[in-house]
Amino acid sequence: MPDDHAHSHGDAHGSELSEMEVRVRALETILTEKGYIDPAALDRIVEAFETRIGPRNGARLVARAWSDPEFKSQLLADATAAANSLGHAGRVGSHLIAVENTPQTHNLVVCTLCSCYPWEVLGLPPNWYKSAPYRSRAVIDPKGVLVDFGVTLPPDTAIRVWDSTAETRFIVIPMRPAGTAGWSEERLAELVTRDSMIGTGLALEPQMAATA
Amino acid sequence: MTNSLHDMGGMHGFGRVEAEPDEPPFHERWEGRVFAMQRAVGFAGLWTIDAGRASLEALPPLDYLGSSYYRRWFLGLERRLLRHGLVGEDEIAAGRSLHPGAALPRTMAAADVERTLTRGEFARPTNQPARFKEGDRVRAKNINPATHTRLPRYARGKTGNVEAVRGCHVFPDTAALGAGENPQWLYTVAFPAPELWGPEADPAVMVSIEAFEPYLDPA
C-alpha cells in the first residue's frame, strides 16, 4: 500500500486518496447489500455534520453567557441544561461542562487518548485536535502549544488543561473582549471562534471581526 | 489495549501543532462515508463506544501512527465487522457481498438519523455512595491492564485533588470487553504539572483527568 506513508506529518494531515476511496466504497456496497446500512441514512449524517452541527452553536452559548450573567451561572452549573434551555440547533446530550477563562486562569481542552470533543456545540474536531502533536504536547507543554497557535498570555496566567478521558465534554467560555459594551448577542457571537472554545485561541478583538 | 500508541499524553517528538485555516469537516468524500458508516453500523448496538475505541487501540502500532484519523476508523470498523462475523474476509477481498447478511437488532433508516445527533447518556443510577468528595487527595493507581482503560499513563501513580464529582457512569474498562456497564463514580482529578512531569515543570500549570473510582486510592 504505497499510500500509507505518503504523508510526512502522519495523522496530522492525513488524506489518503484513491486507495481509501476504493476500499470505503467497497465496504459501503457490502454493508448495503447485506442490509446493514441504508445509504440514505449515511447521506443524512454527512449532510448534518457538513451543514448544521458546527461551532456557531457553541458561539451562541458563549455570546449569551457574556450578555446574561444569570445564563452564565446556569451554563457553569449545568451546561447541558443551559444549552438545551436556549432551544436552538438541536439538543445537547450528556454531559457538557463549561469552564470559564478569567484574567487569572486560561483553560485548554484536549483528549490525549482519542478525540473526545463537544461536537454537538463545536462540530467535528479539526485534524490538529486529533493529531499526535496536539494530543502529546497539550498536557506536558500547553504554553508551547499556545505559541504554535500564536496565543501569548500574561506571564502570570495559570494554565488549566482538561484531558477529556471520559464521556464528559468540555467547552471553554473565552473572556469577552474589551470594547464590546452594548453589542447584541448576534454581533458578539461573531467574535467567538472555534479555537477560543477549545482554549487554543482567544475571542476576536472587535477590529479583527470587522475584517474577518 | 492500554499501553499502546494512542496514549500519547506527554510524548515528545511529534513536532508543532499545525492548524489548517478554514478546514472542512471532511477532506475527502470517503472520510464522511466512514464517519457515517461507523455511526450507522454502531446503531445496531452490537458493540459499545468503548469497544469501538479499543479496536482502534489494538491496531498495529505502525498502522495507528501511519494512518490518517478516518483511515484508522475504517480499519477499526473493518476489524469489528470481521470479529462479529457480520462480514467475511472473502467479501472484503471481493469488494462485494457473497453471503446473506445476519439479522441485526436494528438498522438505521434515514428517519432515525435526527435523534442520533444528540450524544448518548452514559450516567447511570447507583445505590453506592461515592467514595471520594470534592477536595479529597487521591492517588491514581499504577495499573497496566492489557485491555482497554481510560486512565492515561502519565497520571498513574500520581497524586492529585478531587475537583468535582461527576456522577456515576458506564465503566469503559468493562464495557469495552462486552462485560457489562459496571457503573462507577467519576471524578475530575487535577494534578499540578510538577507532580506529573517533575520539579522542572511549570507550577502554574494544572492538568486534570476524568477518573473513574476504580482508578483511584485515597492519598
Image (tube, rainbow, N blue to C red):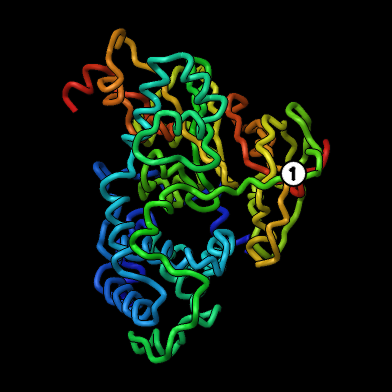
Chain letter behind tag 1: B
Q: Is the residue B142 above or below the residue B79 in the image?
A: above
Q: Quadrant of residue B66?
A: bottom left
Q: Residue at x 37, y 87 (%)?
A: B97
Among all residues in the image, which is located at the extreme left?
A: A211
Q: Is residue A194 left or right of residue B142?
A: left
State the SS at label 1: strand
Q: Is residue A51 left or right of residue A107?
A: left
Which quarter of the image is occupied by the C terminus of chain B?
top right
For the residue carrying disc 1, how many other residues have a C-alpha within 10 Å: few (<14), some (14-19), or many (20+)? many
Residue A51 is situated, as x and y percent measured from the top left of the image, at 26, 47
Asked if residue B199 shows in the view, the reply is no
Residue A134 is situated, as x and y percent measured from the top left of the image, at 45, 45
Asked if residue A207 shows in the view, the reply is yes
Q: Residue at x 33, y 74 (%)?
A: A28
Residue in the foreground of this view, choosing between A47 and A139: A47
Residue B172 is situated, as x and y percent measured from the top left of the image, at 64, 56
Q: Is the residue B135 above or below the residue B62 in the image?
A: above
Which quarter of the image is occupied by the N terminus of chain B?
bottom right
Label 1 sits on what residue type?
Ala
Q: Residue at x 55, y 43 (%)?
A: A164
Among all residues in the image, which is located at the extreme front?
A: B111
Q: Quadrant of residue B30?
A: bottom left
All told, the count of numbered labels is 1
Q: Residue at x 65, y 31 (%)?
A: B192
On the image, numbered disc 1 is attached to which residue? B140
Q: Is the residue A117 above or below the residue A210 in the image?
A: below
